[in-house]
Image: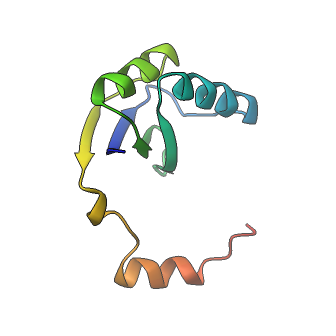
């Protein structure tokens, strides 16, 4: 399935509950979209997310139904996604309990 990188800008700080995340995941699943991973900016006003989706149209529909803004959508080559080199080394040293 194609992979997409999505950038979202939020006017105010993002604060999602576990229930919010479950609902967004349900809506996305209804469009054939699967969230894989996200990064949140330090000011909590921008997210960078990785998704599997059948198309940009499906990803946009899921975002619209979830009422999530979409600043940019970029299709990725699946063979370029990973945690190579220094980033992988850094990730391995991080305390996941905090």
The image position of residue 97, as x and y in percent, is 75, 69
Compared to 77, does 52 lie above or below? above
The image position of residue 71, as x and y in percent, is 30, 30
Q: Quadrant of the N terminus?
A: top left
Looking at the picture, tell me which residue is in the foreground, 17 or 55.
55
In which image quadrant can residue 55 be found? Answer: top left
Looking at the picture, tell me which residue is in the foreground, 9 or 89.
89
Q: Is residue 1 visible?
A: yes
The image position of residue 48, as x and y in percent, is 40, 46
Q: Is residue 35 left or right of residue 59?
A: right
Compared to 48, does 64 lie above or below? above
Q: Is residue 44 visible?
A: no
Q: Quadrant of the C terminus?
A: bottom right
Who's the residue at 65% across and 33% down the image? 21
Q: Is residue 96 left or right of residue 45?
A: right
Label tally? 0
> How is the structure coloured here?
rainbow
The image position of residue 83, as x and y in percent, is 41, 72
């Amino acid at each position: 399935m194609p992979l997409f990188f999505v950038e979202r800008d939020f006017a105010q700080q993002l604060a999602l509950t576990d229930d919010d995340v479950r609902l967004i995941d349900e809506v996305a699943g209804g469009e054939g979209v699967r969230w894989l991973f996200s990064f949140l900016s330090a000011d909590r006003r921008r997210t960078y997310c990785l998704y599997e989706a059948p198309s940009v149209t499906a990803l946009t529909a899921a975002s619209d139904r979830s009422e999530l803004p979409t600043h940019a959508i970029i299709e990725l080559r699946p063979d370029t996604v990973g945690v190579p080199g220094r980033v992988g080394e850094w990730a391995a040293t991080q305390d996941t309990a905090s």
